């Protein structure tokens, strides 16, 4: 018998589950990213929040064209339509 909280089998050493996430883990909230994208998308706030600094700077450079604002609106809607697991897998990890 293996305890449900065990990560590794004590008999054979095989990993049975992923390690528990730490409190300092870098998981980002899908709703927060979507709000940033919808409200401040033209400035790239959602890109900075997700750790994509290069894209955030690009959004800032072209904010005067209003193209980043449209992209932010679309990305905000996309973030809201994804599940939390799918969002974490695609945009955070």
Image (cartoon, grey):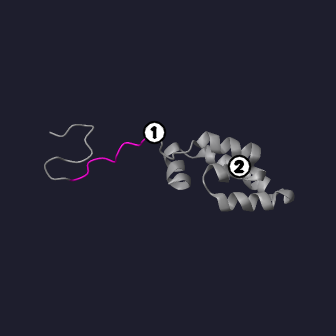
- Rate crowding at label 1 as few (under 14), some (14 to 19) or many (20 or more) other CA atoms within 10 Å: few
Q: Is residue 15 magenta?
A: yes
Instruction: Give the position of the N terminus as an image quadrant.
Output: top left
Identify the residue at horizontal 74%, vertical 55% (top origin). 71
Position of 26 relative to 71 (above/below): above
- Where residue 59 sits in the image (x, y, percent)? 75, 58
- Rate crowding at label 2 as few (under 14), some (14 to 19) or many (20 or more) other CA atoms within 10 Å: many
Q: In this orientation, which residue lies closer to the viewer: 74 or 32?
A: 32
- Where residue 80 sits in the image (x, y, percent)? 62, 43
Asked whether, in this view, residue 53 is left or right of residue 84, the answer is right
Disc 1 element: loop
- Where residue 83 sits in the image (x, y, percent)? 53, 44
Asked whether, in this view, residue 42 is left or right of residue 56, the answer is right
Q: Residue 21 appears in which quarter of the rendering?
A: top left
Q: Is residue 11 magenta?
A: no
Disc 2 element: helix
The residue under label 1 is 23
Q: Earlier in the sequence, mark 2 or mark 1?
A: 1
Q: Main secondary structure of the magenta part?
A: loop
Q: How many marks?
A: 2
Q: Residue lying at the far front in this picture: please name it.
A: 24
Identify the residue at horizontal 82%, vertical 57% (top origin). 63
Badge 2 vs badge 1, beta-carbon distance below 8 Å? no
Q: Mark on residue 45?
A: 2
- Where residue 66 sits in the image (x, y, percent)? 84, 56
Identify the residue at horizontal 57%, vertical 41% (top origin). 29
Query: How far separated are the C-alphas under marks 2 and 1?
Result: 23 Å
Residue segment shown in magenta = 14-23
Q: Mark on residue 32?
A: none
State which mark lies toward you, 2 or 1.
1
Position of 5 relative to 8 (above/below): above
């Amino acid at each position: 018998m293996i305890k449900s909280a065990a990560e590794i089998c004590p008999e054979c050493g095989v990993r049975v589950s992923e390690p528990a996430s730490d409190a300092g883990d870098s998981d980002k909230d899908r709703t927060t990213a979507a709000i940033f994208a919808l409200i401040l998308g033209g400035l790239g706030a959602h890109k900075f929040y997700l750790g994509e600094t290069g894209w955030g700077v690009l959004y800032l450079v072209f904010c005067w064209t209003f193209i980043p604002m449209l992209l932010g609106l679309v990305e905000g809607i996309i973030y809201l339509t994804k599940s939390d697991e799918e969002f974490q897998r695609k945009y955070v990890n």
